[in-house]
Image (cartoon, helix red, strand yellow):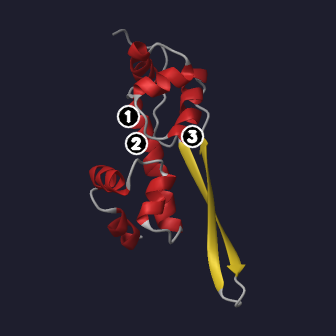
Amino acid sequence: MKEAPYPPKSPAGAFTVTVERTVVYDSRERMHHEYSYTVAAAPSGCDFLDMFAALVTRRGNSDAKHYAAWMGVDARRFNATVHTLSGVGVLAWTDEFAGAVATALLRQTDWPVARVARAALMSSPRAFNSFFRRRYGCTPQQFRWKG
């Protein structure tokens, strides 16, 4: 494969997660916190990668075939195009998204791990734990305890 005439745009740092905490009082005047979060894809300067990154923030851990269909391009060439433009494949982008969401929520909320897994658009808490161990070398709970 021929090398691109421009530097590849890595998914590292492509997703920014903002967590907001609100103090709420219930009917018995007990205080608790409610959290909300937003995920934004940083512009890369490449329209194709920007569209793909925005799609990742909505679809999460899908495979290249599904992303290709959503973007209206040929499935056989989609992963190769992402790889040419960024130096890594679709899986690296979806892992970067899930990792960014998971680490931000584990650090800044008291949500159960299963809820963090859903927010990271993982298929199940078990898949989330496996992903997290593979990527960070510890369980989500251990990551939260480490701070």
Disc 1 marks which amino acid? Leu
- Decide: marks 3, 2 in contact (CB < 8 A)? no
Q: Which mark is residue 95?
A: 2
Q: Looking at the image, which residue is at 40% across and 47% down?
A: 123
Q: Is residue 92 left or right of residue 50?
A: left
Residue at the top extreme, as displayed: 2
Q: Looking at the image, which residue is at 66% across and 85% down?
A: 31
Q: Which mark is residue 58?
A: 3
Percent coordinates x, y for residue 133 in the rendering: 28, 55
Q: Secondary structure at mark 1?
A: helix
Q: N-terminal of the two: label 3 or label 1?
A: 3
Q: Quadrant of the N terminus?
A: top left
- Decide: marks 2, 1 in contact (CB < 8 A)? yes
Q: Secondary structure at mark 2?
A: helix
Q: Is residue 46 left or right of residue 102?
A: right
Whether residue 4 is situated above or below residue 140 in the rendered picture: above
Percent coordinates x, y for residue 140 in the rendering: 36, 63
Mark 3 Cα shell of 10 Å, populated few (<14), some (14-19), many (≥20)? few
Q: Which mark is residue 4?
A: none
Percent coordinates x, y for residue 51 in the rendering: 59, 27
- Decide: marks 3, 1 in contact (CB < 8 A)? no
Mark 2 Cα shell of 10 Å, populated few (<14), some (14-19), many (≥20)? many
Label 1, on which residue? 91
Whether residue 73 is situated above or below residue 87 in the rendered picture: above
Q: Secondary structure at mark 3?
A: helix
Q: Nearer the viewer, residue 71 or 7?
A: 71
What is the CA distance from the residue labelled 3 to the residue labelled 2? 14 Å
Quarter residue 72 falls in = top right
Quarter residue 71 falls in = top right
* Residue 7 visible in the displayed image: no
Disc 2 marks which amino acid? Asp
Residue at the bottom extreme, as displayed: 28
